Image: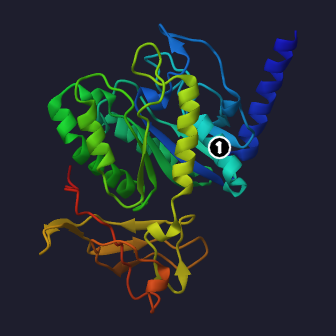
Amino acid sequence: MLTLYLSYAYLLISSAVTVANAAAEKSIFLLAGQSNMAGRGGVVNDTWDNYVPPESFPDLSILRLSADLNWQLATEPLHRDIDTNKVCGVGPGMAFASSLLRKDSSIGVVGLVPCAVGGTNISEWGRGGSLYKQLIRRAEAALEGGGTIRGLLWFQGESDTVSREDAESYKTRMQNFVFHVRADLLLPVLPVIQVALASGEGAYVEMVREGQLGMDLVNLRTIDAKGLNLEPDGLHLTTPSQVLLGNMLANAFMQTRPSAMITTNIASTIISQNFLTQFFSLGYEQINKEGAVEIKVDYVDYRSPASKDVPRKEKVEVNPDTGDKASDYANPGEALSSRVDLSHSKFDPNK
């Protein structure tokens, strides 16, 4: 009887939270990749043990976007209706959100958008593919009820350890993925926290890890899962490891700084990390005299906050160095400079 009562109470709370927060301002995080992001903690022989650690308990301030694009109270397994071909268990998402709320109560309601699918290769996440389209569609749907996309959490690559060709191409494919997501979501410096592999399906784990740890893109941080405990299958993180990983992801996100973002002064308006909505078009790639890759952008479309001035275009150039901040500009509206270090990337915007 007690179990029945608790279940009924949970359903009432869940429904109330969905209605109350559907239109609320949310800090939205996209969760993408493969099985270790989807969560296999507590899953042995295709059976989940149903254990949910305290760090992953439901919280009225943590929501999830369901497969049918409705906000609801977040509960484990987060990916139960997204990664449907396998049994899901505990992943890092809930522990990440709980840790984030403990570290920064001003973050408000956290909206998690599960998108990970087990067994997928990085090439399957390329622009134009079904997984990529679903990610963008769910991200856009998450914004419809209000909120700001604050980051992308990415844990993937185990499937790319089987083929040497895939392992060698991982870094380039991942960098292109980041560029494309940022472009299509109109968030040119969306924080991306990726996880370097703890395991793999093939012989080229270290090659993929080398590519992951060697990425040097603006506002991309890499945390290392190597050494975290694995389930008996030797591939998936245990529940305690997923909790640790969630905390690591939260710590990495907290280290992002507005100074690392693209900033612009137009009519004395400064767009910070909490409000960065710039429309931009990817330009063309060229090699500068130092041998570094530059992406030249002809125009940036800027969308102002609500009730402010109308959208406009600003003539800009993307510079290949780092470290600028809003105070670097003496004349508001003079230019927008994105100082992005692209010296380690080869990006083709048409791929």
Badge 1 amino acid: Ser
Residue at position x 41%, y 77% in the image: 324
Percent from the top left, x then y, of residue 136? 42, 45
Res 11 → quadrant: top right
Specify whether 66 is left or right of 338: right
Residue at position x 72%, y 43% in the image: 61
- Residue situated in front as seen by the camera: 331 or 170: 170
Specify whether 328 is left or right of 63: left
Q: Residue furthest front?
A: 227
Q: Is residue 23 visible?
A: no
Crowd class of label 1 (few under 14; some 14 to 19; many from 20; radius 10 Å): many
**Which residue is denoted by mark 1 in the rendering?**
99
Q: Residue furthest bottom?
A: 331
Above or below 224: residue 202? above
Specify whether 248 is left or right of 234: right
Q: Helix, strand, or loop for circle 1?
A: helix
Above or below 244: residue 287? below
Numbered-mark total: 1
Above or below 58: residue 110? below
- Residue situated in front as seen by the camera: 178 or 42: 42
Q: Is residue 350 visible?
A: yes
Percent from the top left, x then y, of residue 67? 53, 31
- Residue situated in front as seen by the camera: 166 or 69: 166
Percent from the top left, x then y, of residue 292? 17, 67
Residue at position x 33%, y 28% in the image: 158
The type of colouring in the image is rainbow
Residue at position x 50%, y 10% in the image: 44
Q: Is the N terminus in the top left, top right, bottom left or bottom right quadrant?
A: top right
Percent from the top left, x then y, of residue 180? 32, 52
Above or below 263: residue 213? above
